[in-house]
Amino acid sequence: MRAGGIVPIAPPLSLPQAHAIVGWVHVYQFYALALIVLAHASFHIWRHLHLGDNALRIMFPKVLHRYL
């Protein structure tokens, strides 16, 4: 078994309950990380639009400043 067809990963070793628990944990970790990323991006967009502190201009490369 290979993750992404490249990285070898261990098979579940005939432990269906452990495999189900690990799968469940990974699904919720994925959604938790997506929520954190969305909240972080929303905060910086809010700062840029409502506070006008140029936070995005500081983080973005100068080539993209004309779009901010």
Image (spheres, grey):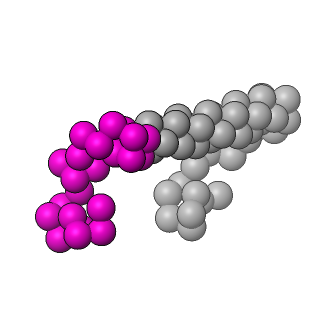
**How many numbered marks appear?**
0
Q: Residue lying farthest left?
A: 62
Is 33 in front, or is 7?
33
Quarter occupied by the C terminus: bottom left
Residue at screen point 53% across, 55% down: 8
Q: Is residue 59 visible?
A: no
Q: For residue 25: magenta?
A: no
Can residue 48 be seen at all in this image of the molecule? yes
Which residue is at 76% across, 34% downward? 24
Q: Position of residue 37 (x, y in %)?
A: 49, 41
Residue found at x 56% / y 63%: 4
| Image-based side of 49 in relation to 17, left or right | left
Q: Main secondary structure of the magenta part?
A: helix
Q: Quadrant of the N terminus?
A: bottom right
Q: In which quarter of the image is residue 30?
A: top right
Query: Does residue 45 lie above or below 7 as drawn?
Result: above
Foreground of the two, 5 or 54: 54
Q: Where is residue 2 in the image (x, y as percent from the top left)?
A: 59, 59
**Magenta residues, start to end:** 44-68
Taking the image as shown, residue 23 lies to the left or right of residue 50, namely right
Q: In which quarter of the image is residue 21?
A: top right
Q: Does the magenta stretch include residue 65?
A: yes
